[in-house]
Every structure is written in C-alpha cells, then in structure tokens.
Amino acid sequence: MNLLLIGPPGGWEWILIFLAVLLLFGGKKIPELMRGLGKGIREFNTARAQVKDELEKGMKEEDGESTKKETA
C-alpha cells in the first residue's frame, strides 16, 4: 500500500540516476546507449505507423465492401 505514495522522480532523483548510469557505463558508453535508445524509439514509431496504416486500410476496404452489399 505504501507504493501508492511514491511519485515520479524529482530533480535530485534524476541527478542521482544520471550519476549511477555514468558510474555503471562510463562516459564512453553513454553515447552508444543513447544511440541505441534512439534507434529503438524510431523503429517502434515506424512499426506503430505501419500498423495504424494497415488498420485504416482494412477499415476502408471493409466500408467499401459493405456499401457494395447494400447497393446490390
């Protein structure tokens, strides 16, 4: 029940998180880590857009078929 009282990290918490990451990965690994994170986000957004386009295309095709059946 105490977990409900924990909010999102504030200013000092982000500083501590950044320092922990810096200590764990070192200064040279952080750019690689950020590059990989950016690539992952781009791939996710591309896949999300493709799924959205496919769903919209399927809905349009379904609407076209239902209007053909109604006119027949």
Image: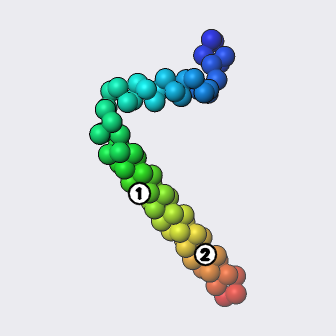
Residue 43, numbered circle:
1
Outermost residue toward the top?
2
> Could you say whether the residue bearing mark 1 is in a helix, strand or loop?
helix
Q: Earlier in the sequence, mark 1 or mark 2?
A: 1
Evaluate whether residue 8 shows in this view. Answer: yes
Q: Name the kind of residue labelled 2 in the image.
A: Lys
Label 2 crowding class (10 Å Cα cut-off): few <14, some 14-19, many 20+? Answer: few
Image spot of residue 61 (x, y percent): 57, 77
Left or right? Give the position of 22 relative to 4: left
Image spot of residue 62 (x, y percent): 59, 74
Left or right? Give the position of 55 relative to 25: right
What residue is rendered at 63% in x and 12% in y?
Answer: 1
Residue 27, numbered circle:
none
Outermost residue toward the bottom?
72
Determine the image quadrant of residue 30. Answer: top left
Q: Which residue is mark 2?
A: 60
Evaluate whether residue 69 shows in this view. Answer: no
Q: From what the image shows, is residue 26 above or below residue 32?
A: above
> Could you say whether the residue bearing mark 2 is in a helix, strand or loop?
helix
Q: CA distance from mark 1 to mark 2?
A: 26 Å
Q: From what the image shows, is residue 45 above or below residue 4?
A: below
Do callouts 1 and 2 mark residues in contact (Cβ within 8 Å)?
A: no
What residue is rendered at 51% in x and 63% in y?
Answer: 49
What residue is rendered at 44% in x and 57% in y?
Answer: 42
Image spot of residue 32 (x, y percent): 32, 45
